[in-house]
Amino acid sequence: MGKIILRVDRVMADRKMSLKELSEKVGVSNVNLSKIKTGKISAIRFSTLEAICEVLHCQPGDILEYLPDETTEPDDIRKPV
């Protein structure tokens, strides 16, 4: 099974926005936003994702990336579970 990689740090760098500034504008604690930025989370609320996208003027696909497992065949990805 592949994994989801968070690219918030890239978009923040592109926007020249600090973690503190993003935290204040999104309304999420610095600690929690840091965990999101470093990918040390297992879930994210849609409301938080929406707020991050609004502040960074981006789409969810700009900050979320799917990396398939090296053993996953392309056809396996499309099979219903």
Image (cartoon, grey):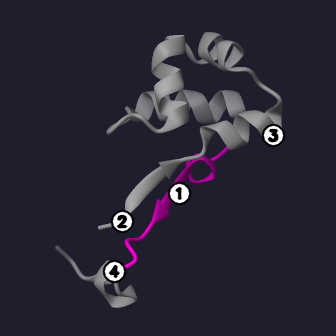
How crowded pointer 2 is (Cα within 10 Å; few <14, some 14-19, many 20+) is rated as few
Q: How far apart are marks 3 and 1 (CA)?
A: 17 Å
Task: Estimate the x, y position of residue 17 in percent, counting from the top left.
Answer: 77, 25
Q: How crowded is mark 1: few (under 14 residues within 10 Å), some or many (20 or more)?
A: few
Residue 80: x percent and y percent? Answer: 21, 77
Res. 57 in view: no
The total number of labels drawn is 4
Q: Give the CA separation, mark 2 to mark 3.
A: 26 Å
Residue type marked 3: Asp
Q: Name the kind of residue labelled 1 in the image.
A: Glu
Q: Return the mark for residue 50.
A: none
Q: Counting residues from the N terminus, which is met first, the one under dot 2 or under dot 4? A: 2
SS label for mark 4: loop
Query: CB atoms at circles 1 and 4 under 8 Å apart?
Result: no
In depth, the one of 62 and 9 nearer the eye is 9
- 78 in relation to 1, above or below: below
Looking at the image, is mark 1 or mark 4 earlier in the sequence? 1
Residue at which label 4 appears: 72
Name the N-terminal-most of marks 4 and 3: 3
Tell me if 66 is positioned left or right of 76 in this view.
Answer: right
Q: Which mark is residue 65?
A: 1
The span picked out in magenta is 57-70
Residue at the disc numbered 2 = 2
Labelled pair 2, 3 in contact (Cβ < 8 Å): no
- Label 3, on which residue? 14
Quadrant containing the N terminus is bottom left
Marks 2 and 3, the one that precedes in the sequence = 2
